[in-house]
């Protein structure tokens, strides 16, 4: 082989190395973009599912508060009906019937107090769960932000 052939062969080899380097850099950038996309997609899905749970818990809290109000309204209507009945028929009732009706009024008041306590317990438990999911959401979001900045 002549010197010229070696020179051309060397130039061709160097050009191939350059081409390989450019392709490797391009592939590395493509992989980085793909990893970022996959990472972002996973982040969005994970945070999205936690957000859905948070929204569900918030809805449950509102529904429980509304249920308590409905129950109170129903109990109050019953109490009013009994009191109206008592007012209209008090003179016609026997003493034991009066006692029984007054016992029912007391039971209704007890039911109101029990419902108030149950609603408070339910809402407290839901709020505790809500705080846990909010904390998890913030931790994951902050962790994702740190990982995202490392990728960049």
Image (tube, rainbow, N blue to C red):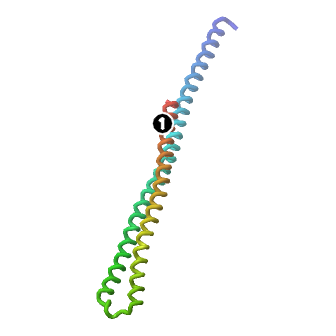
Mark 1, Cα crowd under 10 Å, few <14 / some 14-19 / many 20+, is few
| Relative image position of residue 8 (x, y in whole percent) | 62, 11
Q: In the figure, 111 relative to 16: above or below?
A: below
Nearer to us in this view, 127 or 49: 127
Q: Is 29 situated left or right of 74 in this image?
A: right
At which x and y percent is residue 144? 50, 38
Q: Which residue is drawn at 48% across and 38% down?
A: 142
Residue 1's image quarter? top right
In the displayed structure image, the side of residue 83 where residue 23 appears, left or right: right
Q: How many marks?
A: 1
At mark 1, the secondary structure is: helix
Q: Which of 33 and 134 is in front in this view?
A: 134
The residue wearing badge 1 is 145
Where is residue 7 drawn, in percent x and y?
63, 9
Residue closer to the observer: 113 or 56: 113
Residue in the picture at 41% in, 76% down:
108
Q: Residue sitting at 46 percent across and 57 percent down?
A: 124
């Amino acid at each position: 082989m002549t010197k010229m052939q070696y020179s051309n062969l060397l130039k061709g080899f160097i050009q191939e190395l350059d081409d390989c380097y450019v392709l490797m850099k391009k592939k590395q950038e493509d992989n980085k973009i793909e990893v970022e996309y996959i990472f972002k997609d996973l982040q969005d899905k994970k945070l999205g599912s936690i957000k859905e749970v948070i929204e569900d818990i918030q809805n449950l809290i509102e529904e429980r508060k509304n249920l308590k109000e409905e129950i109170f309204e129903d109990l109050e209507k019953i109490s009013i009906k009994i009191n109206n009945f008592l007012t209209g028929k008090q003179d016609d009732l026997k003493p034991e019937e009066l006692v029984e009706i007054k016992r029912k009024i007391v039971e209704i008041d007890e039911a109101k107090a029990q419902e108030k306590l149950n609603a408070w317990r339910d809402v407290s438990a839901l709020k505790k769960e809500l705080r846990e999911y909010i904390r998890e959401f913030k931790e994951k979001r902050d962790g994702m932000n740190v990982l995202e900045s490392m990728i960049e």
